[in-house]
Image (cartoon, rainbow, N blue to C red):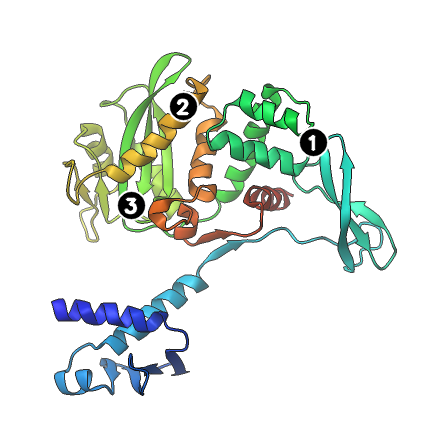
Amino acid sequence: MQAQNERQIKGQEIARLEGAIQRVNEYSYRVKSQSGKGDYEVISSEFGWGCSCPDHTYRSQKCKHIHAVEFSLTIRKKVESQIVIAPVPIGNCPRCKSERVVRHGVRKNKSGTIQRYFCKECKFWFTLNIGFEKMHASPQMITTAMQLYFSGESLRNVQKFLHLQGIKISHVSVYKWIGKYVTLMQEYLDQITPQVSGTWRTDELYLKVKGNTKYLYALMDDETRFWIAQQIADTKYTQDVRPLFKEGKEVAGKKPDMLISDGAHNFHEAYLKEFWSKVPPRTSHIRHIHIAGDMNNNKMERMNGEVRDREKVMRGLKKQDTAVLKGYQLYHNYFRPHEGLGGQTPAEAANIKIEGRNKWMTVIQNASVDLN
């Protein structure tokens, strides 16, 4: 077993080398040896993989070259299935409908700067402000305000920052921006299915809503740390959390292979009704969480800590159906890099890539185009 694991590791090392694997046809590959002094032929047949190296030829072992090809094919399949949200391209000229449109400077006013465009066909100057039409502040200021707020600043601190940039706005307006654009982005991103793993975690934490104790139930993917679903509840141990698990199935497009939770009975009841089945494949339920070892819930506790830090700044929520919690879920998934994921966001780990210098603007503009 140890030797086979070593072959897998060496196979991954080969697959990561540029030009180490060459595709001859659909069933044949040439793989360079690790020494670089030769190469071997790896062939796929109805009997499985075969390789011309001595390790496979004389020992009938699944060699590192076969592992390298399998690993390379897995990476290629993952890249091909990646969902890319790209910045909205410049449209045609609104006057002559020509495609010969280029960026040409910015227009400055008291609300900030807006990109200007120039049509080379009819010499017409115009501006596009997709997703931010009729807003007094510029897209840069609005998206910066949202980034500051969800990364930990209070509404009034965001207001002070905008004042330093020359934008006279109230903290109430900032809150309205958050409500407007969180709703817009959520409706758009809910159409995308994240590629999460088969192991999910669930837990709850208490928070204050108008001074009353409520509980935020969350469902998170173990591998990508993608926050799949959430539910606000009045009670801790007796609340029906089937809506949480049902939403999780809808978002991920599948049931998990394993659910990890604490020993609360309501988790197991919801698991039996939403995830368990009499026929395979069945979802297993790990109910006894330990502080140390593989069956801890540290990843879930870390996410709970993020929400707790955000709630402390807000000094509790003002209403239960606030856009703040949904907004923080979007921020956690799509905009906040995680050290545990090597600097990736959970969305990137789940094969959803957002391009552009300003990811907030990319999502908002795509959501606005999709809405129209």
Callout 3 environment at 10 Å: few (<14), some (14 to 19), or many (20+)? Answer: many
Total label count? 3
Q: Nearer the viewer, mark 3 or mark 2?
A: 2
Q: Give whichever of discs 3 and 2 has the lower sequence position.
A: 3
Provide the residue designation for mark 3: 222
Q: Give whichever of discs 3 and 1 has the lower sequence position.
A: 1
Provide the residue designation for mark 1: 135
Q: Residue at x 40, y 43 (%)?
A: 251
Label 3 vs label 1: CA separation? 39 Å
Residue 250 visible from this viewpoint: yes
Q: Position of residue 235 (x, y in %)?
A: 28, 20
Q: Which three-letter amino acid code belongs to the residue tagged 3?
A: Asp
Q: Is residue 33 left or right of residue 110?
A: left
Q: Give whichever of discs 1 and 2 has the lower sequence position.
A: 1
Q: Nearer the viewer, mark 1 or mark 2?
A: 2
Q: Is residue 132 left or right of residue 50?
A: right
Provide the residue designation for mark 2: 311
Looking at this view, name the residue that lies furthest to the right: 122
